[in-house]
Amino acid sequence: MLNTQTPSCPLPSEEGPSPQAALQVLRLRQGQLQQCADVVAEEFPVALVFNGISHAVMMTSPQDLEEFATGFALSEGIISKRQDIHDLEVHFYPDGAEIQLTIAQTAFLKLKEHRRTLTGRTGCGVCGTESLALLDLEPEALKETAAFTVEHATIQRILAELPPYQVLMQATGCAHAAAWCSPQGEVLRVFEDVGRHNALDKLFGWIARNDIDAHQGLVFLTSRASYELVRKAARMQVPVLATISAPTALAVRIAQAAGIRLMSFCRQNGFVEYPKE
């Protein structure tokens, strides 16, 4: 006899929700209140499970999750190379998603020793770190420096080319972008997310999954340069990191220690660079 009862746990789906939702809102403009349709960004919980053990729950835009999981594992130092991921599956549920990764045993044993749980805020960089001793602020030095020069014209070209790629931002006004750009400033690939860390992890995952040499281009972020972003860039051996907004002092120190060229306040009329003293 067929069991017609509703299962206690919802069955997974291979199709995820849209990264944006349509809502009815009340909009006040020039003293006039109107009811109209609007679009807002989704904020979706995604659980990262390594070898059957839940490691983190991140609030993300529910798209490009294979890239996100790959980039997270690499940029957080859980694995040292893409080949350490033996299997990766994404399962969507009504109220969230689960990404199951099977990683090399050596990487998993290392993860168990330095385990942390990051349940909480959107793209949080240190939520759930169990102690200050586990807060890794010593970046890897670049094995190679950039073999190209970043000119003002490079930044100008990136700023001119980037907006059409920011589909979620244009629809909702609520998304960060991480772009992979050529030394000449051509925008080659862009990932968006409600969390700046997540957008960067998606980009790093794409770079790793496509065997792209991180020394052959630069990363541009439509956000501030927080320390976590620079720390992730150091793990991925990115020689140049450019951001629209300001850096923190800790981000500058990490970039200097790693040998990363950090450029912030990137505008059409210039930028600010933070060379090592």
Image: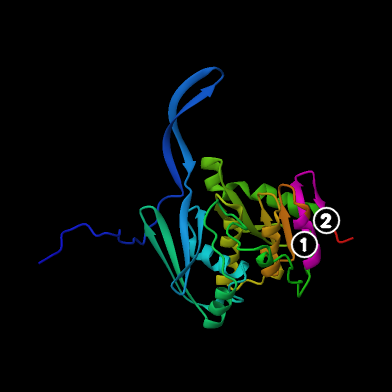
Q: Which residue lies furthest to the left in this view?
A: 1
Q: Is residue 83 visible?
A: no
Residue 208 in the image: above or below residue 37: below
Of residues 113 and 11, which is closer to you in this image? 113
Q: Can residue 20 be seen in this view?
A: yes
Residue 40 in the image: above or below residue 224: above
Residue type at numbered disc 2 = Tyr
Q: Does the magenta stretch include residue 160?
A: no
Q: Is residue 268 magenta?
A: yes
N-terminal-most mark, 1 or 2: 1
Residue type at numbered disc 1 = Ala
Give the image location of residue 34, x and y in percent. Answer: 46, 22
At label 2, counting other C-alpha atoms closer than 10 Å, the crowd grade (few under 14, some 14-19, many 20 or more) is: some
Q: Element at badge 2?
A: loop
Q: Do the residues labelled 1 and 2 touch (CB within 8 Å)?
A: yes
**What segment carries the magenta color?**
250-273
At label 1, counting other C-alpha atoms closer than 10 Å, the crowd grade (few under 14, some 14-19, many 20 or more) is: many
Image mark for residue 274:
2
Image mark for residue 9:
none
Image mark for residue 255:
1
Residue found at x 48% / y 40%:
40
276 vs 17, left or right, is right
